[in-house]
Amino acid sequence: GQNKRQTPPKGLLRTCCRCKKEYTVDKKGFAVVKEECIYHPNNKYRVRGEVKYQCCSQESSSDGCCIAPCHVYEYVDFENLRGYIRTMPPDTNIEDYGVYSLDCEMCYTTQGLDLTRVTVINSACKVVYETLIRPLHPIIDYNTRYSGITEEHMANVKTTLLDVQATLLSMFNSRTILVGHSLESDFKALKLIHDTVVDTSVLFPHKMGPPYKRALRNLSSEYLKKIIQNSVDGHDSAEDAMVCMELIIYKLKEDLKTR
C-alpha cells in the first residue's frame, strides 16, 4: 500500500483518516456529532485505464464499502518528542547483541492511534515478550479488523507504555538488530528511537518505488508460500513478526547462494 498522508489537527477540527471527512471534537477529543464513518479500507489501483478500489473493485467515485461507528484520525507530532526513549549502548562484555522481530497493534483513541499490543520474536521465531497495553486516552474504535483487539481483550489490562518501554530497554541495546515491516509505525507507537534495523518493506521494495510499499501478506505468499492475515478476527502480531524474521532468513540464504 501507499503511505497515508497525515493531516495535522487544526484546533478542534479533525480530518478522518479513513473517509477524509472533516469533523469537530470537544476538548476531550470526542466527536461533537456522533456519526458513522463510511469508507474504503484499501487504496485505489489503475487497471486498463480505470481507477478502482482494491477492497471492493468499485469505481473511485463510489461510496465506501465499510462502516465504522465513528470518525478517527492519526497524527504524530514529531516536534514533540516528549516520552520518547532511545536504546542504550551495550555493556562492553556483551558479544551477542541479539536479533529480534517486533510487531505492534494499535487502536484509535481520542488522541489518534495508540499502542495496544506488542509482540517480540527472537531469531528462533519464538515469542519472548507479548503484552496488551492500556492507552493513556479512551479508546473510541478498537480497529479490530486490523488489530484483532476487542473490548473484551482490554477489560482488565493495566500495563502501560512506560512498563513496555522499560522491558524493551532491558531486552535491547543500541546494537541489537530489530526486524519488522514498516518499522517506523511500530517505533512511533512505542515512542522508541533505535538505529539498527532491517525493514522488510525496504528489503523487498515495491516496483513503483517509494512511497509505495508491498504488503506483508503478499511478501509472505510470494517468498514463503504462506498465507497470513487471512482471519476475520484481525491481524496476529506474533504471526506478522514471525513472517518478518522468516523473510530475513530467506533473503540471507538467497544472497549466500549467489556468492
Image (cartoon, helix red, strand yellow):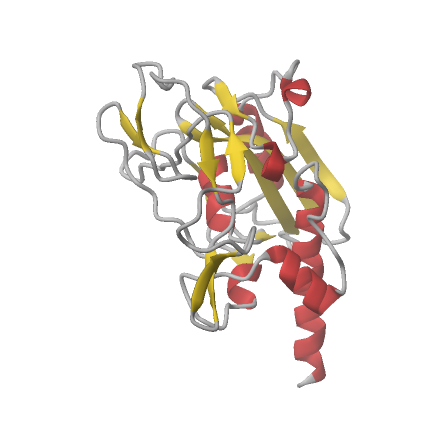
Picture quarter containing residue 106?
A: top right
Q: Residue furthest bottom?
A: 259
Whole-percent x and y of residue 220? 69, 61
105 sits left or right of 74 in the view: right
Q: Residue at x 43, y 71 (%)?
A: 49
Whole-percent x and y of residue 22? 30, 32
- Frontmost residue, 171 versus 58: 58
Whole-percent x and y of residue 32? 33, 16
160 sits left or right of 6 in the view: right
Q: Residue at x 37, y 19 (%)?
A: 31
Q: Residue at x 55, y 45 (%)?
A: 173
Q: Is residue 256 above or below residue 21?
A: below
Quadrant containing the C terminus in the rendered view: bottom right
Is residue 88 visible to the viewer in this orientation of the structure? Answer: no
- Frontmost residue, 173 versus 201: 201
Is residue 219 visible to the viewer in this orientation of the structure? Answer: yes
Q: Residue at x 34, y 30 (%)?
A: 82
- Frontmost residue, 123 versus 18: 18
The tally of labels here is: 0
27 sits left or right of 222 in the view: left
Whole-percent x and y of residue 88? 49, 42
